Image: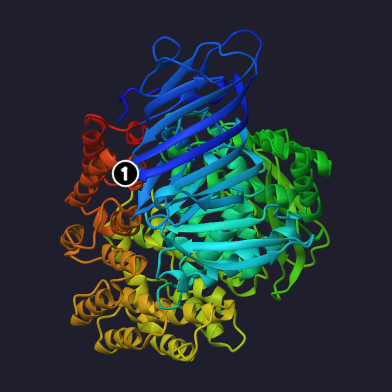
Amino acid sequence: MKNQNPQTIYLKDYQPPLYLVEHTSMTFQILKGDDVRVTSKTQFIKNHDGEENLVLNGEHLVLKNVTLNDKRLESGTDFQVDNETLTLPCPGDSFTLEITTQIDPEHNTALEGLYLSQGNFCTQCEAQGFRRITYYLDRPDVLSKFTVRIEADKATYPVLLSNGNLIEEGDLDQGRHYTLWDDPFSKPCYLFALVAGTLVHIKDEFTTKSGRTVDLRIYVREGDQGQCRHAMESLKKAMKWDEDVYGREYELDRFNIVAVSDFNMGAMENTSLNIFNTALVLAHQDTATDFDFIRVEGVIGHEYFHNWTGNRITCRDWFQLSLKEGLTVFRDQEFSSDMNSRAVQRIDDVVKLRRMQFAEDAGPLAHPIRPDNYIEINNFYTMTVYEKGAEVIRMQHTLLGAENYRKGTDLYFERHDGEAVTCEDFVKCMSDASGKDLTGQFSNWYNQAGTPEITARGSYDEEAQTYTLTLTQYTPPTPGQDTKKPLLIPVATGLIGEDGKEIQETTILELTDSTQDFTFENVSSKPVPSILRGFSAPVKLKTDLNDDELRFLQIHDTDGFNRWEAGQTLALRMIGRMLDKTEKGEEPETDKKFITSFSDLLSQALEEDSDKALMARALALPDIAMIAQERNVVDPTMIYEVRKQVLDDLRRSQRAKLESLYRQNNTQTTFGISPDDMAERALKNTALAYLSTSERREDIERAKQQYDTAKNMTDRVAAISALINKTCAERKNVLAHYYEHFSAHALVIDKWFSLQASGIRKTTLEDIKQLRDHEAFNLRNPNRVRALYAAFAMNNPVSFHDVSGKGYAFLTDAILELNETNPQIAARLLTPMREWKRYTTDRQEKMKAALIQIRDTDNLSNDVYEIVQKSL
């Protein structure tokens, strides 16, 4: 572990590399799990005037040999080495350095660099894992072509993979064999990948637009190959989509995907050898939910799209991380929108943004999409960099239009292929190609933290037949940024007449000042404005629309996102009023008009031609986390009780319609993953969730019956979710059956842990402690850790924030234990405690004490230290 006063890295201090790498040849001799010999032969050239030392990064390495231009060097005399660097004094203008290191993947519990996952070797080098393999210039602006030779025992490790094209393979003495890989495209070392092990694969091919055939393979452990077909089809769809929408063709002979169960991230875009968490590859109706199917498709697309937006063009430095991640998230969101329901995809993306990123923007770790400093780069793989970064790209698409945006990306690929660039380089391409300058005010989005707040006020002049919309923008202060500059914000707006018909199609209003008026001409009657359609900017919107106008939009808005948004706003307003009453000691009541609106939505959902996917979202109430964002002081228990009261009132008053909706959508005899199939299941299970908020026997038996007859994991998990908060025998029975039936499937058992950790029961804290001691729990497996600890702390705010503080103590113990073995995962588990100041005083005191306990622990990792210190 590192010291507790680590160095802060600043964007302003960036300097170009003193040396560049022309070519890197590597040989990996895999001898045992704890003994791999790595020889790297690297051709350097000087990138400066004068005489400067070559300083290479390296950690957890045993140095065996250093040779400069075929001359063996002596440590202490010819070079200096410490725990983090190897320094070579002024080695010349052009030279070849050969370094041999010994590494121990078997005991690499941090899962960075080269490590073992269930007997198979694999790598994770982003952001700074390559330095755990050999001494190197481990920074993204040093690009090199790589040739890699892997040698290992053939019986133990029959599959040997690396980046690029396979150019040679063969047998060696003593039962060993080798493969030789060549990657003709220069890349930074964070994109290096290696896999060696006993794996099986499924195979397919893709013919590019120029007629080349690409060999596609997905490698998994024996027994998992039957769950790979959806991932393969998703890959082919992504390759075709990228050609059609962005004009990007894949130019290597092979594209490999490997799925491993021990992985800190979701997936990694290493050139031509994507390494995935099994959770984002394996998908079958018996083991994966509809959410899993969509997520696999989206992440397969995301990592493939990185081939151009991240690999062929990469980041100059890690502060530019959103250059590749924000852009690629936008690309995968659009891909998923084209493959499924666009409105629903947008809703789901915005819910994720609001739930996680808005909270990040409002907390002590708020930062711009391009941060200006960090202590540990792993901590900046954040929702802000990814999801808000995607929204900034989306705004450029909105402001320029699809045609000019495409011109901009074409110019970006043409101008910067093979380079490491900055966010400014991307924005300049957008500006140069379109003729619209985005390098000025719009760039504030890259440099300012915080979620902008827009206030909208409308006025109608009947005599002049004009409608004026006044928009005001304000961005609250964030740590280190007390005052904010006005942003360029695209506000997509339409007007709807009193007859429910659109009288002004969507227009992009460009808000640039603190306050600005926009006037619509020839408006024959007072309209209802539909503002921020499609969520055209990542802002919080407050309007002067009354509840009746929101109900009008809920029924008549032609923008699917804003129809859903109107209903969510109504619910948040009502629940907010109910919470205000509760805080005053008064009895809250569910608004009768809200119940009527819900009834009207149910009637729409029951219509034969209803948009079932949209209706499933529209009928759902905002979750506890979303409601909490609207409160000055957060009391999760109070929010839960008020929300439950609304659910109960809706169920009691609309039972007949909910039962009809359930029956009407409970007719599938065969399984499919078309958008229509998924929408029907979603609507059915939304009805089931409402009906199951009661303790009536018939409702419990309905959920149990669905579990017993389920032909897919979506319906099975929905049935368990309907029972998970209860104390009935049916809950115990379905959990026992589920574990027994699926114990051989790790990802399915992850769901078993998560479902129980999310249950809101008096015994939840005791339940999760028993799960922590369960034979199937493994603290070394990130998926299992997330399934228990993250599900409890992030998806169960009522139990986690129990006033006893036991939830905080449970999480603290896990963080301190993981700090010793996997600091990345430990740091991410801190997320729900970062906003400790927003909670009730009693909860604040206990969370603060937990954070101080963590901060004052000896040998705290940089990952955990940075999050705790900034939170406090």
Percent position (x, y) of residue 350? Answer: 54, 57
Q: Which residue is drawn at 67% across and 55% down?
A: 253
| Color scheme of the displayed model | rainbow
**In this rendering, does residue 63 appear at all?**
yes
Q: Mark 1 points at which residue?
A: 109
Percent position (x, y) of residue 93? Answer: 64, 15
Return the residue nearer the eye: 179 or 345: 179
Return the residue nearer the eye: 123 or 694: 123
Location of the N terminus by quadrant is: top left
**Which corner quadrant of the image does residue 778 belong to?**
bottom left
Q: In this view, does 782 lie above or below 229?
A: above
Q: Which residue is drawn at 47% across and 44% down?
A: 382
Q: Residue at x 36, y 44 (%)?
A: 31
- Relative to 215, is 660 on the left or the right? left
Q: Is residue 193 above or below residue 482?
A: below
Percent position (x, y) of residue 596? Answer: 48, 79
How many tags in the picture? 1
**Which corner quadrant of the image does residue 696 belong to?**
bottom left
**In this rendering, does residue 588 appear at all?**
no
Are there few (<14), some (14-19), or many (20+) residues within 10 Å of tag 1?
Answer: some
Percent position (x, y) of residue 260? Answer: 42, 57
| Amino acid type, mark 1 | Thr
Check disc 1 and report its element: helix, strand or loop: loop
Q: Is residue 767 above or below residue 619?
A: above
Location of the C terminus by quadrant is: top left
Q: In this view, does 858 lie above or below 332?
A: above
Furthest residue in direction front, as rendered: 173
